[in-house]
Image: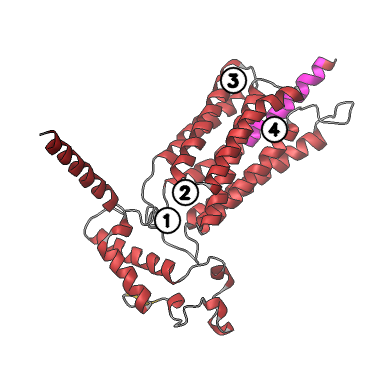
């Protein structure tokens, strides 16, 4: 009797796992047959693919100049297999839509529609805009502390977190650059750099939040606080790059570090008399709401706008407001130190 129950339990688990696994579009027999036929013939329906039209199997880049692709497509590294998968995915999704079925993921990705070879055009556009706003915020902060605010007697800015914000700006711009590249074409190289850059930025943002909230000014104390944070983030990045590129794990780690720094900023804003604490409260509230978009995943609307694209869009006003708070904080810190010096 015990053996029968065990067998029934294992059979039930196996059935559930098969159902879950079957939710992936790349296991769909029709899709798999389409990809196999495309690799043999180079065509999906009436559409024949350029990458598959070479009997030698070589990339068009190696062919005559008049058969080569434009540069904006050539660097994407689309090959016969990836093109077959893409067009079979679109064909299959059109069939599923006619049957009233919802979109599903293929090879772990939602069915996005390319634009000029760009895999997720909306996310790429918003990543570029975020990069521009980060650069604008950093430049305005740089001009403020170096040319508008007074210097201390040792010819350095009074604001003691100036260098930390410069590092933050560099890490932010680096993260948005690789975000744009990864959403443009998510090969393993670009995906690793995107995840690593995001983890480095969020880890450093957590460290910066700790130093600013607790007003840590002593260099030795900063090093002691930074050591465990840097060690944890570095270990996580090494795990992603050299052990397993686990997207789910990276999301969990980044969300945990993000929420921790939001808690720090929110508590500090509740107790401080900073004149711009309302800006900080708006950034924290908006950041929490936008983080939910990272957790709640849904298929792209019309094949272009998904939760990640909306998160990128939501980051635009928050980034502008964040740098506004940083500028106000530098003015507030400078004024406070000058008054104490008197």
Q: Which residue is mark 2?
A: 309
SS category of the residue bearing label 1: loop
Q: Distance from label 1 to label 2 (Cα)?
A: 8 Å
Residue drawn 48% across and 54% down? 122
SS category of the residue bearing label 3: helix
Q: Which residue is mark 1?
A: 304
Q: Are marks 1 and 2 in contact (CB under 8 Å)?
A: yes
Say which of 134 and 52 sits in front: 52
Q: Main secondary structure of the magenta part?
A: helix
Earlier-in-chain disc, 3 versus 4: 3
Earlier-in-chain disc, 3 versus 2: 3
User: Residue 307 vs residue 316: left or right?
Assistant: left
SS category of the residue bearing label 4: helix
Q: Which residue is mark 4?
A: 327
Q: Position of residue 129 (x, y in %)?
A: 58, 50
How many numbered badges does the structure rendering display?
A: 4
Is residue 316 visible to the viewer in this orientation of the structure? no
Earlier-in-chain disc, 1 versus 2: 1
Q: Position of residue 314 (x, y in %)?
A: 50, 41
Residue drawn 57% across and 67% down? 75
| Within-10-Å neighbours for mark 4: few <14, some 14–19, many 20+ | many
């Amino acid at each position: 009797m015990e053996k029968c129950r065990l067998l029934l339990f294992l059979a039930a688990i196996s059935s559930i796992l098969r159902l879950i696994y079957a939710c992936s579009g790349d296991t769909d027999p029709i899709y798999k047959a389409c990809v196999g036929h495309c690799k043999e013939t180079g065509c999906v329906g009436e559409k024949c693919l350029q990458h598959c039209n070479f009997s030698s199997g070589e990339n068009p880049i190696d062919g005559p100049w008049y058969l080569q692709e434009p540069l904006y497509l050539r660097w994407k590294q689309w090959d016969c297999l990836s093109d077959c998968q893409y067009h079979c995915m679109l064909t299959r999704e059109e069939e599923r839509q006619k049957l009233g079925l919802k979109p599903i993921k293929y090879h772990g990705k939602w069915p996005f529609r390319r634009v000029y070879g760009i895999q997720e055009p909306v996310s790429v556009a918003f990543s570029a805009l975020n990069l521009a706003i980060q650069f604008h915020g950093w430049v305005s902060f740089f001009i403020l502390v170096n040319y508008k605010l007074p210097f201390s007697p040792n010819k350095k800015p009074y604001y003691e977190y100036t260098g930390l914000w410069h590092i933050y700006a560099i890490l932010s711009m680096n993260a948005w650059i690789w975000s744009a590249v990864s959403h443009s074409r998510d090969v393993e190289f670009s995906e690793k750099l995107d995840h690593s850059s995001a983890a480095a930025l969020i880890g450093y943002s957590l460290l910066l939040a700790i130093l600013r909230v607790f007003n840590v000014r002593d260099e030795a104390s900063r090093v002691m606080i930074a050591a465990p944070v840097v060690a944890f983030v570095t270990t996580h990045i090494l795990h992603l790059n050299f052990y397993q590129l686990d997207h789910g794990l990276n999301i969990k780690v980044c969300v945990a570090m993000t929420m921790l720094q939001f808690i720090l900023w929110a508590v500090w804003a509740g107790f401080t008399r900073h004149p711009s604490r309302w800006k900080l409260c708006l950034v924290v509230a908006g950041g929490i709401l936008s983080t939910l978009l990272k957790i709640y995943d849904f298929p792209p609307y019309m094949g272009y706008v998904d939760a990640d694209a909306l998160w990128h869009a939501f980051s635009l006003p928050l980034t502008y407001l964040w740098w506004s708070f940083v500028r106000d904080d530098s003015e507030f810190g400078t004024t406070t130190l000058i008054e104490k010096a008197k």
